[in-house]
Image (tube, grey):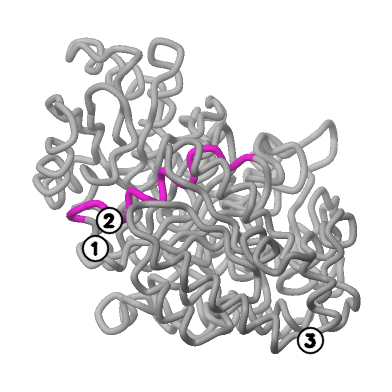
Amino acid sequence: MAAGKSTLARHSAERLDWPLADSDLVLQERLGESIPEFFDREGEPAFREREREVVLELLQSPGPGVVALGGGAVEAAEVRAALAEHLVVHVDVDVETAWARALKSSTKRPLARDRDRFEALYERRFPLYESLARASVTGGKDVDGAGEAAVALTRAGVPDAVRMLWSRAGEGHPVYVGPGALGAAGALWTGQGRGFVVADEDVLALHGDQLLASLSEATEVAEPVTVAPGEQHKNLAEAERVLRALAQRGMQRGDTLVALGGGVTGDLAGFCGATYQRGVAVMQVPTTVVAQVDSAYGGKTGVDLPEAKNYVGVFHQPAAVLTDPTVLATLPVEELRAGYAEVVKTGLISGGAVWERVLAIGTLEQAVSDDLAALGAVIEDCVRTKLAVVAADEHDTGARAALNLGHTLAHALESATGYGEFRHGEAVALGLLAALRISERELGLDGGVRERVHDLLAANGLPVSFEGPSTDSLLAHMDRDKKRRGAQRNLVLLRAPGDVAVGVEAPDDVIVNAVDELRR
């Protein structure tokens, strides 16, 4: 209750030009009195029986339509069975927000009179919502287009395993996650004009035919522009080459750039899309773990300078993201392992059930070969976390800095070694260990967290020690970190899993000791 279902249903019905029904309003009309009045007089069992009858009737209506369900309707087994024949959208909202809205609502909700009971209902119903839904939308006003994007899941050629998460950043856009999403790119096409693919040359050789064939079912597709893999190619010279190639192929402002590859390709192509003719639509198709759990979302695009990483860039939200975990099976094992560091980072930021699922997944190599469903669930967890943080701080002015846990040292390692010695995830692994050690000394983080992270990273083949740049050199590169404000480095640290501290200034000797501990 109070999630925003009626708002999303109304917006969706208007945009789709479909009839709208709100089960609570229909039921109230049938009862001839308000729901609270009936509920208080007849009791909840009598209300649920009447509600069940109305909902089943609405779900059996012929033709397309939009139905807003009451929050407790899905607790009836018959309703859950009937919903299997329909596209279910979960309007996701945290319990604090739902409770605050319920208290302010002009409708006096019978089950929103006691906070403890309200929270118990939330905990009981949430798994039902998740199990029934194929699309998830964060509750709020910025939901235009979410219904249309969800309906795309029902098109021919979209596997049942593909789900949609709605990002509220920018004007809002869909993120399609699940096995088979890449091959359904045409059916899920949300772009405009023609498609212009910018792809990692290795990824294009592996997955290009499938993507191009699918896209060509929806739009005209130009000859792809390829980029070499590796962070050392994410620079202004390469951006100019890509931009000129797009111009030579005749790309116009009304066309769509499709980025196929990992984080380097996504950042570079996104930057080109943001600046080409002052901005074109971009569809991200991430193919590495780092990109699928982190970099493809949030609209950060950019290239590196020799002096520092990601120093030239712009915020440019994608028109859509297609995340297909099955493509991870073709990754070199080193790339697969490197991505695990971002999974661990996200688990530490989220805490709770997400952190527990990260701990349970074991090695990514095993997950890719033996349990793709579990890996897909963890990837979806990471995407949800990233989308929630970005929605709260789209332009990185505060809370979004939490996503940089471990990245201060990581970026310093990358830039100090010319972007050729460490993969991003390998640098993040070392950065996490340093950040957790500093967190122990400055914020009292339980030392067991760092030990567990150390073991997880080592088990996944990631570095837990290094040789290389001097500590003075690393400190100098840290001083050029984008989070720095004046003389303050603004470190991102951890009090406990799920409790991140941003903008922390630690003494130089603490930072030096944490870095030196990692040296072989």
Q: Position of residue 103 (x, y in %)?
A: 89, 61
Which one is nearer the viewer's eye here, 290 or 16?
16
Q: Which mark is residue 159?
A: 1
Residue type of the residue flagged with mark 3: Gly
Which of the two residues, 53 or 445, is positioned nearer the viewer here? 53
Residue 42, percent from left and from top: 79, 85
Task: Give the residues in magenta.
Answer: 142-157
Separation of residues labelled 3 and 1 (CA atoms): 42 Å
The amino acid type of the residue labelled 1 equals Pro
Tell whether label 1 touches label 2 (CB within 8 Å).
Answer: yes
Secondary structure type for disc 2? loop
Looking at the picture, does residue 125 appear above or below residue 267? below
| Residue labelled with disc 3 | 43
Camera-nearest residue between 64 and 213: 64
Q: Is residue 500 above or below residue 305?
A: below
Ranked by sequence position, the earlier of labels 3 and 2 is: 3
Mark 2 or mark 1, earlier in chain: 1
Indicate which disc, 3 or 1, sits on the residue closer to the N terminus. Answer: 3
SS for callout 3 = loop
Q: Residue at x 81, y 77 (%)?
A: 118
Kindly identify which residue carries mark 2: 181
Q: Is residue 445 visible?
A: no
Secondary element under disc 1, as helix, strand or loop, is loop
Q: Residue placed at 79% from the left, 86% from the top? A: 43
User: How would you rate the neighbour count of disc 2 (Cα within 10 Å): few for under 14, some for 14-19, many for 20 or more?
Assistant: many
Looking at the picture, does residue 388 appear above or below residue 462?
above
Residue 283 counted in the magenta span:
no
Q: Quadrant of residue 86?
A: bottom left
Q: Looking at the image, is mark 3 or mark 1 nearer the viewer? A: 3
- Left or right: where 373 falls relative to 436: left
Q: Nearer the viewer, mark 3 or mark 2?
A: 3
